[in-house]
Image (cartoon, coloured by chain):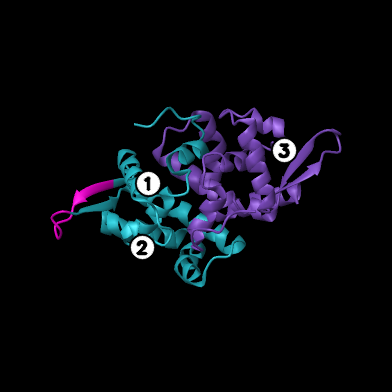
Chain colours: A purple, B cyan
Amino acid sequence: MARDPKSFCSINLALEVFGDKWTLLIIRDIMLGDKRHFREILQSEEKISTNILTDRLNMLESRGILTKGNDPSHKQKFVYSLTQKGIDLLPVIAAMAQWSLKHEPVSAISQQHTQPIAEGGPELIGRLSDELATKHL
Amino acid sequence: MARDPKSFCSINLALEVFGDKWTLLIIRDIMLGDKRHFREILQSEEKISTNILTDRLNMLESRGILTKGNDPSHKQKFVYSLTQKGIDLLPVIAAMAQWSLKHEPVSAISQQHTQPIAEGGPELIGRLSDELATKHL
């Protein structure tokens, strides 16, 4: 399990879980890209390494953010699902997208995918969370 | 300046700026703790090192998130101010606090400080952003 946190500040506790360059990209892939298998996430544009992906998936599982199950359609494959704790990262993802869309050179394709979430407000976040719950829980 | 981003996805671009364990703690201190001097941020509970703090403040300045000015009341001190790009990180901070308050063992004192922001919704975020603009811009 994880080391003792540096503090029990809410911001710090969140950063101790996903304060790195990769963890929220994995969550993005599962949440918005519906990528549920290791190999699919590995193929994303940012080219995460096998080692880092394995490490982060294990961490997310141990933190109760993902569950790993057998895929009924592929005997040798695992399928990753978000828990409620994972689905509740949607507002963090949305707030980050909103900030980048205003201040960073976001590509047209990413703008198309993330602007609705960034600008949809609490009502859309609620609706998408319900959809994710139906799919993942 | 920064290296080329791994992708121009809005989530990735945000992570390339503040996807680490320390950057958003510095923003928290300046934004919510009204810590405007190097030494004040250094004294925060998480005990950031001088090296990391120097590195991140320089990065935040080069990214246009902070400005560094002379403090009129202390000849040898610099005072750090948020830009609009920095103030616009408030919804990210709020979303992270909201997630931790629901899912992590946040201390009573941090709960007291961050719950109002986490639960205030867009209206409170707007009001606090205006207050920060008055103070920093």
SS of the residue under disc 3: loop
Q: Which residue is mark 3?
A: A36
Q: Is residue A86 visible?
A: yes
Spatial CA distance of label 3 from label 1 is 36 Å
Identify the residue shown where x is 49% and y is 57%: A12
Q: Would you identify the image quadrant in which residue B72 lies?
A: bottom left
Judged by depth in the image, the label closer to the viewer, 3 or 2, is: 2
Q: Which residue is mark 1?
A: B52
Judged by depth in the image, the label closer to the viewer, 3 or 1, is: 1
Residue B136 falls left or right of residue B25:
left
Q: Chain of mark 3?
A: A
Spatial CA distance of label 1 from label 2 is 19 Å
Residue A15, image x, y percentages? 51, 52
Pointer 1: residues within 10 angstroms few (<14), some, or many (20+)? few
Asked if both marks, 3 and 2, belong to the same chain, the answer given is no
- Going from N to C along the chain, the mark reached first, 1 or 2, is 2
Q: Which residue is mark 2?
A: B33
Residue A73 falls left or right of residue B7:
right
Q: Chain of mark 2?
A: B
Pointer 3: residues within 10 angstroms few (<14), some, or many (20+)? many
Within the magenta stretch, is there residue B114? no
What range is drawn magenta here?
B67-76
Amino acid type shown at disc 1: Ile
